[in-house]
Image: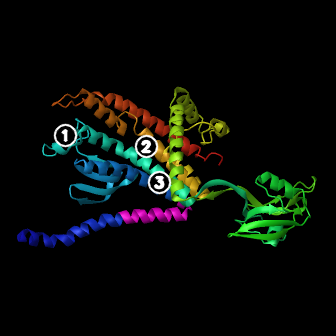
Amino acid sequence: MDDASSASAPLEPQSWRAGFGPLVRLLAVVVAGLVVAIVFDALPVLVVVLALVAMIMLHELGHFATAKWSGMKVTEYFLGFGPRLWSIRRGETEYGVKAIPAGGYVRIVGMTMLEEVDPSDEPRSYRQASFPRRVLVAVAGSAMHVVMAFVLLFSLYAISGAPTSTLPTIQSLGQFSKGLSPAQRAGLKPGDVIVAVDGHKFTNLNSLIAFVNKRPGDALTFVVARAGHDLTLAVTPVDGRHVVEKIGGQRVQAAKPSGPPVGIIGVDLSAVRDVAVGPLTAVRNAGSQLGSMFGQTFSGLAQVFSFHGLSNFAHQVAVAGNNSSSGSSGTSGQQSGGGTILSIVGAVQIGAQAAKQDVGALLYLLAAINLFIGIVNLFPMLPLDGGHVAIAVYERVRSRKGRNYHADVAKLMPVAYVFLLFIVIVGLGALYMNIVNPAQLPGG
């Protein structure tokens, strides 16, 4: 024991240096990605990419943790594919990062009867495990997606706040080309909730706007709620026919000069704002929303992968480069009342838009993506996890007491290859479509 220790001691610094180089390469790639995101104002894109990477690795963590718990031998837990950037071995498992972050994987010994396994590892292979443990490992990835979707929805309700109808609220103050707006002169601020105007309470945004529009030049008494206190402010609308507003660097006439007088005060209003709830209410709301999203996801999948849906998708791909038809064909992802197939690029595109729009919108979108992946991944066909579940169930049915039946997976491979080819073709079509016509959030 002492001899072995003394012999290995001089090698430790060299081993440390050998592992330090790959770690530096990994950190260099991460820093380079961050710099590029900052330079090109693409931090929302980076956030979404990191969120998708986290989804992938948590999916694989489900397989990893349940396989370890079940006593199976797990040899690798990696993010990405291709050349290895960095890795470290702990016990019998190697953890690391590869150069192409297009997914991740966990390598469990003996996933099928086709795999050659060292005889000493055979008792700890996936194929030799009991039926309940095999099913547990196979469904663990999809289960992680459901858990992630619930956590994201809980965060939406409890932290970010869900969109809720409220009294009219000032979102921002308009800018007039000449002088201050009536709202600025009166001291109104973004975030002010309009409780009443001249004693009238308005729950309908259009009614409030119409009330103000009819009173140019009249001194109106606004009661607004700000920081928990009610404030009374005098605001006198001006005639919009004589006002030019600065919107997005352009000058815009507030009202038609030839039209009737229109009272404006220079504010952007909204009757919806994000409202957070308590933890128990958030749990209840998240569970209810998750159930609703399950139904929507199944309905969307049935529609998209029906004969009509696939025909429509093929048409969308065919006309994707035709700008004149992109709006009507839905290639930009703005279909109403129907689903569409998104590539990973499309998911990043709409995710970045959601991140710029609102944290709540991003959380909801990520929850929807998680649920979609979790459900699709259980489709009973290799190489999806559902294929491993189907094989485990089939083998369980065919097994007899004292004799376990093992399916001949080789016979399934032609069907699996056809299915994989279908997935690749659909994926490439979606990728092309999202590159030619970038995906857009509905209404975006």
Q: What range of the chain is rendered magenta?
A: 26-44
Q: Position of residue 383 (x, y in %)?
A: 35, 37
Frontmost residue, 302 versus 31: 302
Q: Depth check: give the residue in front, 78 or 39.
A: 78
Compare marks 3 and 2 and give the one earlier in the sequence. Answer: 3
List x then y, in percent, for residue 3. Answer: 5, 70
Closer to the eye: label 3 or 2 = 3
Q: Is label 1 or label 3 in front?
A: 3
User: Is residue 323 rendered to the left or right of residue 250?
Assistant: left
Residue 34 highlighted magenta (yes or no): yes
Residue designated by label 1: 116
Q: Quadrant of residue 14?
A: bottom left
The part of the image, by quadrant, that contains residue 409 is: top left
Residue at left offset 42%, top offset 55%: 54
- In the picture, measured across the screen, residue 266 lies left or right of residue 362, that is right
Earlier-in-chain disc, 1 versus 2:
1
Identify residue for label 2. Answer: 374
Residue 297 visible: yes
Q: Amino acid at mark 1?
A: Glu
Residue displayed at 43% across by 43% down? 374
The residue nearer to you, when weighing 143 against 120, is 143
